[in-house]
Amino acid sequence: MSDIGWPRSRSSALQRARTRLFGQSEIVLTVAGIGAWMLDATSHELWWSDATCHIHGVPPGTEPSIEQAIEFYMPEARAPIAAAVQSAIDHGGEWDLELPLSRLDGTRVWVRACGRAIEQPGGHRLVMGTFEDVTARRQASDEARRELRLRSETETLLRDVIEGIPAAMTVYDREERLVLINNNYKQILPGAATLANKGDTLEDIVRRKVKADHYAPEIRNSQPESVREAWINDYLARHRSSDYSRIFELSNGNFVQVSNARSTSGNIVTIRTDITPIKHAEAELRYLAEHCSLTGLYNRPVLLSALSPASRGHHGSLILFDIDFFKSVNDGLGHGAGDLLLRLIARRLRRLVPSGWTIARLGGDEFAIIAPGLTPATGLVAFLDRLLACQRRPVRLGHARYVPSISIGVAPFAADHTSAPTLLSHADAALYEAKRQGRARHAFYDAELAARIQRRIRLSDQLRIAIARDRLAVALQPQLNLASGKITGLEALARWNENGEWVPPQEFVAIAEDVGLAQSLGLSIIDKALAAHARLRQMGLQTGLIAVNVSTAQLLADDFLESLRQALARHALQPSALEVEITETVLLDRSVVRIAETLDTLRTRGISLSLDDFGTGYASLSHITAFPVDRIKIDKSFTQGISASGERGLIARSIIGLGRGLGLDVVAEGVETESQMSFLKSHGCTAMQGYLLAPPMMPDACEQWLLARA
């Protein structure tokens, strides 16, 4: 376009029209940056002002043809401007258009092109108009439109985000007036949506909610006004803080978590999230963590927490009990029956125990009750009697009818600093005492029981040391054949002297069984008994058999038979010199099959077997015939029941008859009078032992006794 040869001569008519129509205004237009132009509709001559040339980027004075002028416009704008010019030429129309054009140097600009037709005298028509560079305004307008569009899109996005948040959202301005509330607010807080309107103050909304019991059960409208006011003031103070988070339980049972954030402009944005499923899950997990899954009662950790000095308050009692012979239910009726019995026990407890007390299942068949305020002086014994009676009622376990019983241990407590584990151990000691007294009863932890426990603890430690240092001894008590008058055996009895005090055998033997020392204690006594027996035989004394008591733990030990063989070999004794005594309780052990195999092996090796304390246990005739025993021993309680006239010797006579009928020797223990010996001899008893013949003696004393008798 730069090499176009544009003519500069114009008709006189066009020059005159230019002067007449523009005149001095051309200068004004030029100053304003507006270009003028004129077109002769007949000759198509075109005149441009210098300002018009500047807008198009051509030298001043350039006067293109109409076709050349239209070529300056961008292709998309040429048709509209050409049509507008042609319409003005043909019909006298006018236009006002903003169109893009390309300057001579290729720069793209926007111009406002205005034009109109003017009729001259004689019907001559001119078309004139102006050009204005509106690029800057268009750019500013476009920028403004882009900004408005972006703002609109941002607002739309913000609204979408606000409505898409799965939470109730409110915004309060600096004057604490509600300015925004989303739709989720109405869904999460349906009742509260009618109480919160735009423009309302935060305090007004809170007061309406309190009046409508929206925050119940935390605060209710029925509470005193002072309480409500204090709660509202606290709520407002927290809400106004910059960092606020709180969980509310609403009147409909739902839970919401409320969080606040204050913007730099002072607005308060509040988010309320429905956490009801989370709270329900927490409650379920807490229930599972705190309760026994079988019975629904509290578990041990909850009991210990409630027993802590800070929780238990003042005076009260810890009641601990378990089910007597519960193992027989599981073994005889199955674990399903055992579980059913535990659930029935728990159901009876709930019906009996007052609300406010803590009931727990500690594990297995052990239950506990924390009874606040209940002491021996406030009806504790009466409650324990009701507890025993309640649990004693028969139950149906499958096809079986069962009558349960329980043993109870009680540890009274006060508002002191006794720890929960200590209280539990006290109650457990009392429970053990109740079982020792015969079960189906209750026992209290008191000073006497505490002293026995302390003694038991002390003796167990000392017994362990005594066994390790070989400080135990044996006493020997002779046995006399009633028919021949000869000594047929010696029974070895364990003895222990600790710091000059003889500890009763029944006490330390029981301790050994409880603390796992029965096997080592038994081996020590066997070794000492065999050593004493071997020494007496070496002196040529007639001693018969040496009888030793053997516990269940020894019979079940893997190395018992080998240890016994080594002990006999160590003292150069034949197995026939030894008699092993067992009690009836051994026959009732759940490992009875294994015990029977051990007894058979002993019998095969030539060791005699006797059944001690016969008649005091629970063994039946079938148990006796099933085991290979050589003799039975009448317990001293039955022997001492024989009167001078013999009227009270029915049990002893029956045992003698049973033994003779089975082909077994019968030995009577605890014989103290001539009349007892005569009674036993007259009824066919094989042998006797007791103070009438000789008391238990230490080996040296027994040696002198045997020498004197010889």
Image (cartoon, rainbow, N blue to C red):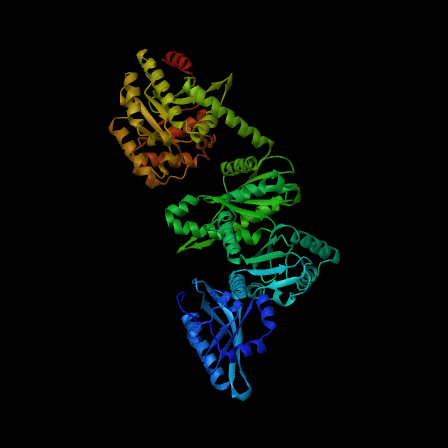
Could you tell me residue 637's position as x and y percent? 46, 32
Report the front residue among 296 and 269.
Answer: 269
Left or right, residue 365 beside residue 233: left
Could you tell me residue 576's position as x and y percent? 27, 23
Q: Above or below — where is 102 with respect to 625?
A: below
Left or right, residue 579 beside residue 58: left
Report the front residue among 548 and 290.
Answer: 290
**Among the 4 quarters of the image, the one containing residue 257:** bottom right
Quarter of the image that includes the C terminus: top left
The residue that appears at 64% across and 59% down in the rendered structure is: 172
Report the front residue among 421 and 196.
Answer: 196
Report the front residue among 679 and 695.
Answer: 695
Q: Residue furthest left?
A: 604
**Among the 4 quarters of the image, the one containing residue 225:** bottom right
**Residue 76 visible (yes or no):** yes
The residue that appears at 63% across and 45% down in the rendered structure is: 372
What number of labels is visible?
0
Q: Above or below — where is 597 with respect to 4?
A: above
Could you tell me residue 34's position as x and y percent? 56, 69
Could you tell me residue 281's position as x and y percent? 49, 54
**Among the 4 quarters of the image, the one containing residue 702:** top left
**Residue 490 visible (yes or no):** no
